[in-house]
């Protein structure tokens, strides 16, 4: 794919320069009944960077992503995305404001083909109304074909041409993860949230996925926040790393700083009592 | 061997996203339409048109409606019969109010009323799923059935409680009432069903159909991609009920000629649901296959099984016993399909076509 094609990343000029804060999470606390999933966590994501969120199992990483894109509503704290402050929002509002994500357990539309799944990512960009859709030939089909072109570019980029028409339910796991990344990319997000993009993959698939993530970040300028357990991958990919443990932030900074942080080492390796 | 796309190259996305990408399919669909519109009215007997083709097409349309909701959007409904009833009573009241308006227009317009009813009874789907939604749609079924009896205004205070279809014309031809010819009625039903199925397939292959399927397959991810569940689910209920309503109006006005509320009871809902399950959830072709198996197959058995049985065996069989055999076979088929092939006959057909494409090789 022509990586410099500006049509692929239409919303780069939103007034936020590369390196400025794109997403700011302020003193978020989230609890389910008596269980405190996240306690008073603040962090930011700067435009153009790869931000990693790590932590042991149950640390609240996925909850944090769910808060960011509106699945969970935190009891305290605010989130500002592109300068707009918000506390409660629906997932589709997050989607239309430019946040897209993938899931830890693949959440593809299993009954639909790869092509339709990635087309699904463009739902928000298609506007022809019901009556044009009913007629199909004419404007609705033109719109469909325009979006198909963008989707085909993503398919080329992710090297999944051969499974274009396969139902995704029948695909192997590594490819499903790739299709899911494609679906998230199709929305041309400003902020891409990846929830364990490499979980359960073999080395080769991990290398491919890392390559895609770097290319998405560097060539399209997409800001990425990712959760990952493979520390080698995190240290190589991420510009900055935040560490959560039991819902609290215990470390934040450059990968080397985090690696050297005693609290982080204790959280991962345990401490002698 | 003859069914193969070798040499048929797609050079545009438009050609690639066509409904029938393989040339042979295109030929077949035009052939079927030619048979349907020309050969059957010319050569079909009155029994064939009245007792087989018209009911088959009406029920297939209702199955298309239910399939939009259940097969494509994943919302199971047992209110089909009631929504068909809304369409039928709406059409009756409309044509009494406006006797001179083209009846086909009124039949289609009556779908709007059932669409409104569908949206209203679809509201719980925003909160509940699966079996619980089945129960609420069943409530719609019983409530509407009750309403059809309780409000005599709906059947124009007819002492028998039935709708009696008046004689109405479309384009100068009598198409409803006792004086309408079978051919005219058949062509009306066929035209409405073909056009509405075509519209349905267009909607399903576009953005709106995709958003329905997104809700069906993974509602959380759908919401994340910007689908609003409120719009997606209620629009599916509206479109589905619209189709059911038109099918109900056709059932009374073109097929049966008169109707009591019993033809819209929950047995009708189950009949259409079984058509969708047997034919194939999420397939328009399946609606027609399912309607053929559930409706036409028992008729064929009724007439053909006793003579065959009596030639093959020394025992006798009457046609009511043949009906029982047909019922048993359909029951077994429904169970077998639910367990073995949830995507129904349409999937079997797709597998068969795939085998045919690569024949004589297995892959």
Image (spheres, rainbow, N blue to C red):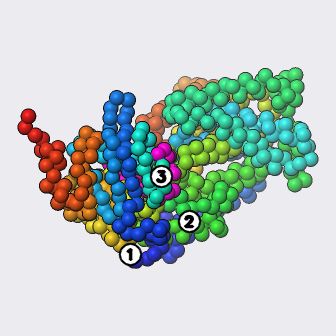
Q: Is residue A186 above or below residue A199?
A: below
- Secondary structure at badge 3 equals strand
Dot 3 alpha-carbon crowd within 10 angstroms: few under 14, some 14 to 19, many 20 or more: some
Range shown magenta: A87-108
Q: Mark 1, chain letter? A: A
Q: Quadrant of residue B53?
A: top right
Query: Label 2, label 1: how many angstroms apart (C-alpha)?
Result: 22 Å
Q: Which residue is mark 2?
A: A144
Name the side, left or right, on which B217 lies relative to B42.
Answer: left
The one of B252 and B178 positioned closer to us in this rendering: B252
Dot 2 alpha-carbon crowd within 10 angstroms: few under 14, some 14 to 19, many 20 or more: many
The one of A4 and B195 positioned closer to us in this rendering: A4
Q: Which residue is mark 1?
A: A3
Q: Marks 1 and 3: which is nearer the front?
A: 3
The residue furthest right is B100
Name the side, left or right, on which A234 lies relative to B11.
Answer: left
Query: Label 2, label 3: how many angstroms apart (C-alpha)?
Result: 34 Å
Q: Is residue A174 above or below residue B333?
A: below
Q: Marks 2 and 3: which is nearer the front?
A: 3
The reply to whether label 1 and label 3 mark residues of one chain is: yes
| Image coords of residue B61 (percent x, y) | 66, 45
Task: Give me the residue at 90% from left, 53% from top.
Answer: B172
User: Is there any visible trace of residue B216 in the rendered image?
Assistant: yes
Task: Give me the residue at 37% from left, 35% from top.
Answer: A31
Magenta segment includes A93: yes
State which tag comes first along the sequence, 2 or 3: 3
The one of B280 and A272 positioned closer to us in this rendering: A272
Task: Give me the residue at 36% from left, 40% from top.
Answer: A29
User: In the rendering, which numbered label is found on residue A85?
Assistant: 3
């Amino acid at each position: 794919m022509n990586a410099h094609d500006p049509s692929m990343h239409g919303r780069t000029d939103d007034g936020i320069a590369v390196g400025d804060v794109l997403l700011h999470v302020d003193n978020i606390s989230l609890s389910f009944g008596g269980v405190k999933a996240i306690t008073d966590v603040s962090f930011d994501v700067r435009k153009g960077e790869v931000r990693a969120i790590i932590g042991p199992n149950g640390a609240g990483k996925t909850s944090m992503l769910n808060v960011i894109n509106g699945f969970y509503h935190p009891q305290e704290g605010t989130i500002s995305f592109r300068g707009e402050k918000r506390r409660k929002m629906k997932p589709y509002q997050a989607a239309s404001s430019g946040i897209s994500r993938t899931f830890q357990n693949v959440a593809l539309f299993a009954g639909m083909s790869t092509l339709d799944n990635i087309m699904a990512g463009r739902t928000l960009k298609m506007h022809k109304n019901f009556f044009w859709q009913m007629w199909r030939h004419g404007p609705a089909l033109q719109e469909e074909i325009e979006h198909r072109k963008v989707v085909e570019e993503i398919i080329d980029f992710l090297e999944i041409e051969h499974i274009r028409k396969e139902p995704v339910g029948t695909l192997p796991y590594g490819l499903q993860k790739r299709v899911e990344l494609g679906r998230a990319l199709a929305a041309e997000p400003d902020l891409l949230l990846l929830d364990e993009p490499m979980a359960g993959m073999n080395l080769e698939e991990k290398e491919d996925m890392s390559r895609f993530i770097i290319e998405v970040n560097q060539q399209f300028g997409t800001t990425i926040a990712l959760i990952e357990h493979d520390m080698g991958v995190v240290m190589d990919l991420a510009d900055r790393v935040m560490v959560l443990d039991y819902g609290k932030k215990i470390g934040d900074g450059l990968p080397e700083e985090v690696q050297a942080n005693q609290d982080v080492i204790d959280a991962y390796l345990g401490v002698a009592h | 061997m003859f069914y193969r796309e070798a040499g048929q190259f797609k050079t545009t996305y438009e050609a690639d996203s066509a409904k029938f990408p393989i040339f042979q399919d295109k030929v077949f669909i035009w052939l079927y339409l030619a048979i349907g519109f020309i050969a059957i009215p010319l050569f079909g007997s009155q029994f064939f048109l009245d007792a087989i083709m018209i009911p088959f097409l009406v029920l297939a349309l209702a199955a298309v409606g239910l399939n939009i909701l259940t097969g494509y959007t994943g919302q199971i409904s047992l209110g089909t019969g009631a929504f068909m009833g809304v369409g039928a009573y709406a059409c009756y009241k409309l044509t009494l109010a406006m006797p001179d308006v083209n009846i086909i227009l009124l039949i289609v317009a009556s779908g709007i009323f059932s669409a409104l009813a569908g949206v209203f009874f679809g509201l719980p789907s925003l909160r509940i799923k699966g079996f619980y939604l089945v129960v609420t749609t069943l409530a719609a079924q019983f409530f509407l059935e009750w309403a059809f009896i309780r409000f005599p205004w709906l059947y124009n205070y007819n002492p028998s409680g039935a709708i009696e279809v008046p004689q109405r014309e479309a384009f100068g031809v009598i198409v409803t009432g006792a004086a309408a010819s079978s051919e005219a009625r058949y062509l009306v039903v066929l035209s409405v069903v073909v056009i509405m199925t075509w519209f349905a397939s267009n909607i399903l292959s576009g953005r709106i159909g995709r958003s329905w399927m997104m809700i069906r397959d993974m509602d959380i991810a759908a919401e994340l991609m910007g689908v609003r569940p409120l719009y997606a689910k209620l629009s599916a209920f509206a479109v589905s009920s619209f189709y059911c309503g038109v099918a109900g109006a056709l059932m009374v006005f073109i097929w049966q000629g008169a109707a009591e509320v019993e033809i819209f009871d929950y047995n009708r809902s189950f009949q259409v649901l079984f058509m969708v399950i047997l034919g194939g959830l999420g397939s328009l072709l399946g609606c027609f296959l399912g309607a053929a198996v559930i409706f036409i197959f028992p008729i064929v058995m009724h007439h053909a099984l006793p003579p065959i049985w009596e030639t093959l065996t020394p025992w006798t069989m009457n046609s009511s016993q043949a009906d029982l055999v047909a019922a048993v076979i359909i029951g077994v088929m429904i169970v077998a399909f639910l367990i073995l092939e949830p995507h129904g006959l349409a999937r079997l057909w797709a597998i068969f076509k795939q085998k045919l494409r690569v024949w004589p090789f297995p892959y």
